[in-house]
Amino acid sequence: MAADSKRFRPSLLALHLAASTAFARTVECQEPTPPAAPPATAQSASPAEPKKDDDLLHDAKDGAFDVSEFLDSRFGFFPIVIPITEPAVGFGLGGGLMFFQTRPRVVQTPDGPRIIPPIATFVGGMATENGSWGSFAGHLHNWDDGRIRYLVGGGYAALNLDWFGQGNTSSGTSFPYTLEAWALVQKLTFKLGDSDFFLGPTQRLLSTSTTFDDSSVLPPGIEGDWLSSTVSGLGFSFGYDTRNSLYSPTHGTKTSLDFTQNDKVIGSDFDYSRIGLESVNYLPLGGPFTLGLRGDAEYAGDDAPFFDLPGISLRGIPVGRYVDNASVTLESELRWDTTPRWTLLGFGGVGWVADKVGEFDESQGRGAGGVGVRYLIAREYDLRVGIDVAAGPEDEAIYVTIGTGWVRD
């Protein structure tokens, strides 16, 4: 679960959530041109009118419950609580503290305003009902008006998981195991001219110790040298981002291509490449409707250990349930802002795993989908929180969700 950058999304999400707490005051000072959006979303994301009292939990504009002023009042220091509802580890809670060294700033571009993240540091931890726990820390830095951006995150986790076999070879039989891991990820990206493209090097280091509950017999496909190992890799990240909002976009695209080469020359026990391509697109359909489309493709070389294999990533399917050397996931989400505060949505998708890229036509697709509801809890940040109920091939799950469910760094 700590093997690649996607496994760190709870901590990266916490960085962005906490960083956004300073956005409103900066935006009001610089008065940027608001991004285009459907009427309901545009209304919800417009700057707040000045408060006439000290009520920090209601919006002066509509009187609804809203924590924007509360978040503003905690500038420089912000506590974060993130419910964990991942079926792979069960229900739990994550939390931490964010410390700000600078304020975020708004710059204008031909396509609208862009936010330059603040310099910030985050520390936190998590625990779940099945005994999994972990602690982590991260730092976000930038130079030259945000043209150079640096992100580092790492920590320790002890996770109680289930191994279902590569390519579902175990036919539904699971093998419980505990994965203890120390991990470090770094990313340094440089803006390419005045474009919305960023490019730069990445580094990944992972030290693991794996113990299966039945240690006398290893599950099919598991090699002994995987049980205590180190993965060390260097690579690059190439990204493009035109979203008009981090949490509830109504138009724009976020695309990223990430490549890592793990090699014994730099301390890895395994030699293999890992590549991932993901694109999330938001299309305004008119009025309060927005369509989101997501595509994700990943590949890991033949020498990749079982804990670093790509897998199907859909709400309704536990992390690690379907994994192999290659994976493809497609998902869509239709959002309906029924009022400026409340949103209903439906989502669904399908994913495939295969031993090789050319064998997807022989793979059985695994689908999942569901419905959800969101509430605009912080209008000044366009921040919505809510619950998704999803069903997959074997089980149902409930997810506490921030934004669209596709929040990306």
Image (cartoon, rainbow, N blue to C red):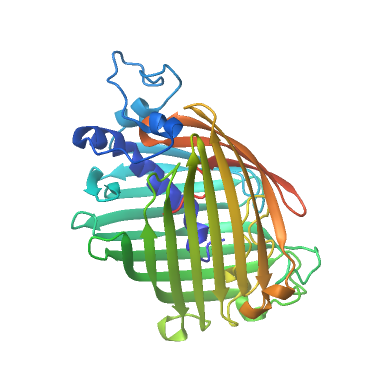
Q: In which quarter of the image is the N terminus?
A: bottom right
- Give the residue at x 66% y 54%: 88
Percent x, y of residue 138? 37, 54
- Give the residue at x 47% y 27%: 340
Image position of 1 (left or right of 90): left
Q: Is residue 156 visible?
A: no
- 246 or 102: which is nearer to us? 246
Relative vertical location of residue 14 with respect to residue 64 in this rendering, above or below: below
Q: Residue furthest top?
A: 53
Relative vertical location of residue 359 with respect to residue 72 in this rendering, above or below: below
Image position of 120 (left or right of 399): left
Percent x, y of residue 366? 72, 60
Q: Can residue 205 be seen in this view?
A: yes
- Give the residue at x 34% y 26%: 69
- Give the residue at x 53% y 62%: 2
The quadrant holding residue 334 is top right
Percent x, y of residue 12? 43, 52
The quadrant holding residue 329 is bottom right
